[in-house]
């Protein structure tokens, strides 16, 4: 699905901030200047600036402009718990090489216990996929995905090894809109220890997500079990 113009402006400004074109504590060009640069409406510019503010890259100051509040650090991670981002996108933005191994792939009918756990309706046809994800050759997480079969026609292990979200958005033209997440820490399972080389740790970080498309249909439930050395995301809080 083509991205809206404001998303392109957001991405361009974000790249310039991260490359230092707009330095930490400096001000972005005014709204009027940005309207001229991008040949767009003021509302389009404001939507792009709001996305930057939501991600903690800039802070609008009434009567003064928009100040850059982001700067690179040795522990900087671009991924945000507030955004919807695929594993491949996360890797690309952090300059890392992703790889995926599909360990399990099956079709099943959602039973009562699984329905209570995931939020899918009992009796729904699902696709269950287990993948081990690596960054620069280091196995960093295990993804357990349950996908609504009717929402992902034609999905295969090869697609799951490449990118499920790329298939949904570019091939099936699905618009992925919302994800609800819960984050916990759990003792490592035998499978975690086998796949992730956890020593000296005895635990993993767990994110469970319910994802919804633009029709409000829950098409995915995912449990991501992450190695403590690589589990690091950012969030922006406001008072």
Image: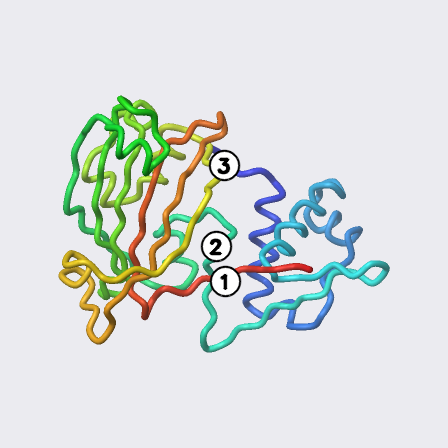
Residue placed under numbered mark 1 in the picture: 234
The secondary structure type at the circle numbered 2 is loop
Residue 152: where, in percent of width, then height?
Answer: 31, 28
**Tag shown at residue 50:** none
Label 2 or label 3, whichever comes before in sequence order? 2
Q: Are marks 2 and 3 in contact (CB under 8 Å)?
A: no
> Do labels 2 and 1 touch, CB within 8 Å?
yes
Q: Earlier in the sequence, mark 1 or mark 3?
A: 3
Q: Residue at x 30, y 60 (%)?
A: 186
The residue that disc 2 covers is: 81
What x and y, as percent, mark residue 175?
46, 32
Position of residue 80 measured from the top left corner of the image (x, y, whole percent): 49, 57
Q: CA distance from mark 2 to mark 1?
A: 6 Å
Residue 33 on image: x %, y %: 77, 54
Reading the image, the residue beneath label 3 is 177
Q: CA distance from mark 1 to mark 3?
A: 20 Å
**Which residue occupies 21% across, 26% down?**
109
């Amino acid at each position: 699905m083509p991205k809206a113009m404001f998303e392109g402006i957001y991405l361009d400004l974000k790249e310039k901030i991260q490359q230092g074109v707009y330095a930490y504590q400096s001000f972005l060009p005014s709204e009027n200047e940005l309207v001229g640069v991008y040949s767009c409406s003021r509302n389009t510019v404001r939507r792009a600036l709001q996305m930057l503010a939501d991600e903690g890259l800039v802070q609008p100051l009434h009567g003064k402009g928009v100040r850059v509040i982001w700067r690179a650090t040795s522990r900087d991670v671009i991924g945000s718990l507030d955004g919807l981002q695929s594993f491949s996108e996360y890797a690309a933005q952090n300059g890392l090489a992703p790889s995926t191994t599909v360990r399990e792939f099956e079709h099943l009918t959602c039973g009562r216990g699984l329905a209570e756990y995931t939020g899918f309706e009992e009796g729904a046809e699902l696709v269950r996929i287990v993948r081990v994800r690596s960054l620069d050759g280091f196995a960093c997480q295990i993804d357990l995905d349950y996908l609504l079969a009717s929402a992902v026609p034609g999905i295969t292990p090869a697609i799951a090894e490449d990118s499920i979200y790329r298939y949904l958005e570019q091939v099936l033209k699905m618009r992925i809109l919302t994800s609800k997440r819960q984050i916990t820490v759990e003792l490592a399972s035998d499978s975690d220890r086998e796949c992730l080389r956890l020593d000296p740790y005895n635990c993993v970080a767990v994110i469970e997500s319910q994802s919804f498309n633009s029709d409000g249909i829950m098409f995915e439930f995912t449990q991501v079990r992450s190695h403590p050395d690589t589990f690091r995301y950012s969030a922006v809080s406001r008072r």
